[in-house]
Image (cartoon, helix red, strand yellow):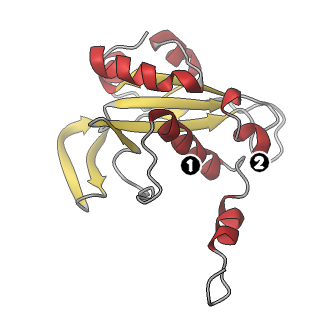
Amino acid sequence: MSDKGLDIDRFRRWVLGDLVDNRNRGLFAEWLVGEALGVIDESTPRREWDAYDLMYRETKIEVKASGRSQSWSQAQPSKIRFGVEQKLSSWTAASDEWIPHGQPMRFADVYVFCVHEPELATNENVADADHWTFWVVPTDVLDQELGPQKSLGTRTLDRLTSSVAWSGIRARVDECVRSRQCI
């Protein structure tokens, strides 16, 4: 508690307390991938709206998250789709500048797609890495296989690469960076 009676941890619990919420689950997925890659530094907070989510060994990582269950009532599990739209410019938080691209492009080097699998999501199972599935795909592969396509689902991901558990993310990213392919 600060001298003004404010408890920053209380604020964090209030804002991020529901991990099933789409926004919070997405932030949690970014943190999960960052932890797997060993790049989370609490002294450098996450930057909202940056051109990519994480930097790993000079490699720009974009994390995309979805879940089969939502924080609202559903008649059936959600259909998993990830946005991968190419853009004409990217904003970089470090320099606070817009970088124009001569043609539409995906700015990150590697994408990590994350699906929270349980059809009844709870804070406890969202927080358990064993309840997630991950696909790691280099942007070169997305560009070659999808071109200007704006979204993809898990069937396309399964065609492009095999999924990995949380403990396999770092090795798969390393493989992608080394070979520009992941199988």
Q: Residues within 10 Å of mark 1 (few under 14, many from 20)?
A: some
Given the image, on which type of amino acid does mark 2 rest? Ser
Mark 2 → mark 1, Cα distance in angstroms: 15 Å
The residue that appears at 72% across and 46% down in the rendered structure is: 20
Q: Nearer the viewer, residue 183 or 43?
A: 43
Depth check, mark 2 against mark 1: the one in front is 1
Looking at the image, residue 20 lies above or below residue 14: above
Secondary structure, mark 1, is helix
Image location of residue 3, percent across then percent down: 62, 89
Q: Which residue is identified by label 2?
A: 71
Residue name at image x 31 percent, y 42 percent: 87
Q: Nearer the viewer, residue 21 or 182?
A: 182
Q: From the image, tell me which residue sits under label 1.
A: 27
Q: Which mark is residue 73?
A: none
Q: Residue 101: percent from the left, percent from the top?
A: 19, 43
Placement of the C terminus among the 4 image quadrants? top left
Identity of the amino acid at label 1? Answer: Leu
Q: Earlier in the sequence, mark 2 or mark 1?
A: 1
Label 2, residues with CA under 10 Å away: few <14, some 14-19, many ≥20 = few
Q: Is residue 78 toward the left or the right of residue 153 in the image?
A: right
Question: Residue 152 placed where, x, y %?
Answer: 50, 26
Residue at the farthest bottom position: 4
Q: Quadrant of residue 74?
A: top right
